[in-house]
Image (cartoon, rainbow, N blue to C red):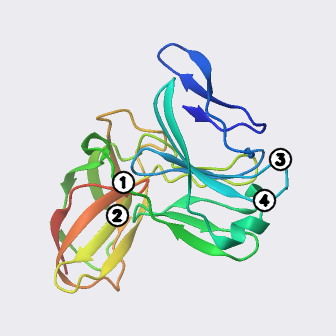
Amino acid sequence: MFQAGGTANNDVYDPVSGKWSAATHFSNADSADGPAVVLPNGHALFQVSPGVFNSPSHFYEVEVKSPTTMTVKQVNEPASAAGQSSYEGRLLMLPTGQAFWPSDVGDIQIYTPKGHAKAGWLPTITSVSNSLNRGSANNVVKGKQFNGFTEGGYYGDDEQAATNFPLVRITNTGSGTVCYARTHDFSSRGISKKGDAGQAKFDVPNNCDAGASTLEVVVNGIASAASSVTIN
């Protein structure tokens, strides 16, 4: 676990040993008040700035391989970041696997990371009806790892942007049109352990395209393998 400090100090916690160790610092910046999001590739994206309420902001991707092996790399950032402090931004993981960044000054950006999730991180569908009606409610999808391995988005005391719950995405095979079903009644809201079984209910919108489609469960921007369904 990588901790971005409110001072210049960062740390890594190893749950196996139960010990903390010093981590690579950000250059002339910290996360006294600011957002972060875990990307599908397993890296974390941070917005940081020097001290509390100061600018400029910079963005870093952090990859932790072990308590002593990590990469802290500054990445591309919005032009408006030069005049903003980290507390003015938010980060939310979208079901596309991209990070959504809105800011208090009205700038809205999308960050597209490189890489992809490992196969073992994907949610898995074990059961869903192959025939679904538009406007139907309380359809059930069952599977594994429906709550992801992280909360997804973080901020601190002012904002939370957790995405560790299953979304249902339906894509029409012919038109390519995508619609999202409202999900609810999750079997859990905690973070998954590897192989954890779970389920959710979902309501199919009336405006989904009818016909042959695929259905995916998406958690923290990571999509399951698609199941074939027919939307009636």
Amino acid identity at mark 1:
Ala
Q: Where residue 200 is drawn, which disc sits there?
A: 1
Q: Position of residue 90 (x, y in %)?
A: 66, 60
Which callout, 1 or 3, points to the residue nearer the camera?
3
Q: Tags 1 and 2 in contact by the CB under 8 Å rule?
A: yes
Could you give the CA–CA distance between mark 1 and mark 2, rounded to whole angstroms?
9 Å
Q: Residues within 10 Å of mark 3 (few under 14, many from 20)?
A: some
Residue that mark 3 sits on: 51
Q: Relative to the observer, which residue lies in front, 91 or 12? A: 12
Q: Relative to the observer, which residue lies in front, 154 or 172? A: 154
Residue at point 33%, 52% (across, down): 116
Could you give the CA–CA distance between mark 1 and mark 3, rounded to whole angstroms?
42 Å
Amino acid identity at mark 2:
Val
Q: Tags 3 and 2 in contact by the CB under 8 Å rule?
A: no
Above or below, 28 against 138 in this view is: above
Amino acid identity at mark 4:
Ser
